[in-house]
Amino acid sequence: MKRFAAALALSLCVAAGAQAAAPAPAAPVKMWRLDCGQIQSNNLNDFSDTFAYTGQTKLLDASCYLIKHADTYMLWDTGLPKELLGLPLTGPGAPGATLAKLLTTQLATIGVKPEQISIIGVSHHHFDHIGQAADFPGARLLIGAPDVAELKAPGNAGAKALAHWLSGDGKLEPVTGDKDVFGDGSVVMLNLPGHTPGHHGLLVRLAKTGPVVLSGDLAHLTENYVNDGVPAFNIDRAQSLASISRVKQIVANLHGMLIIQHEARDVAKLPAFPAAAD
Ligand SMILES: [Zn+2]
């Protein structure tokens, strides 16, 4: 009986504690879209394991995002590497990817210094999403834990760009499952594996614009998102389809906006830089 009374008291305490820990009102959130380069696909079937795009080519945007939560700045993805700055997109010897403006240059336009970036979240470890991370060495890096494991495997191409964090010099936070970045539900990394094992998207709840889902590489083009298309180079087809299905339901349930980060017409749903969405 004594034990029962103690258990009851404990459960009441827990209930009271849960009430006291009700989420604080969300801080104001703003979001800017940033130009993180362009990639030319001369064979769009690279993005379809069902050969949906035979004979088609496409210019893919690479987009990054700056999020301001109260006074804290966070970058979502860091784009193509600086080495591609000013290179021609096409022509003999062209690498098929180019960068018009550095992230640091764009941030300077709105008066944000590299050391003001406290958090970098990356959707996954591919080169076009982590390319300029090293310009923000003071930031804590949020990245899917399974992607960290892949980066630490011998010979991983992305390891160099994130060496500062993988070596233990920078603050690295491997993310398992979803991650509520600021603890108030306003910015949440969504676990969307399939493209890579630790792939994530980002849900950003903006007061005026409404909920926005940044896709990462859940899909590279609208057609793949709409038609459940999967690139042959994704790590897991079933996971990719489950992740697309999850995002479709989130967008429907929240009446949200999806931004496919490589799709220029989606990126254009947000105000052109330096204007911000709020
Ligand atoms: Zn990509």
Image (cartoon, rainbow, N blue to C red):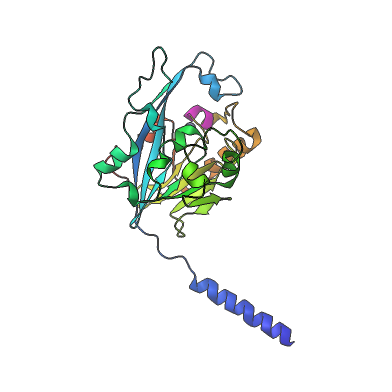
Q: Residue furthest bottom?
A: 2
* Residue 109 rendering spot, x and y as whole percentages: 25, 41
Q: Nearer the viewer, residue 29 or 131?
A: 131
User: Would you say 129 lies left or right of 103 here?
Assistant: right
Q: Nearer the viewer, residue 82 or 13?
A: 82
Residue 164 versus residue 28 in the image, above or below? above
Residue at 25% over, 44% down: 110
Question: Is 54 one of the magenta-colored residues?
Answer: no
* Residue 243 rendering spot, x and y as whole percentages: 58, 40
Quick check: can you spot residue 251? no
Magenta stretch prevailing secondary structure: helix
* Residue 242 rendering spot, x and y as whole percentages: 61, 39
* Residue 176 rendering spot, x and y as whole percentages: 58, 50
Q: How many marks?
A: 0
Residue 120 versus residue 6 in the image, above or below? above
Image quadrant assignment for residue 229: top right
- Boundaries of the magenta span: 221-225
Quick check: can you spot residue 29? yes
Residue 20 versus residue 189 in the image, above or below? below
Image quadrant assignment for residue 63: top left
Q: Residue furthest right?
A: 1
Q: Nearer the viewer, residue 85 or 203?
A: 85
Name the quarter where the N terminus is drawn: bottom right
Residue at 69% over, 85% down: 5
User: Would you say 261 lies left or right of 244 here?
Assistant: left
Q: Nearer the viewer, residue 130 or 83?
A: 83
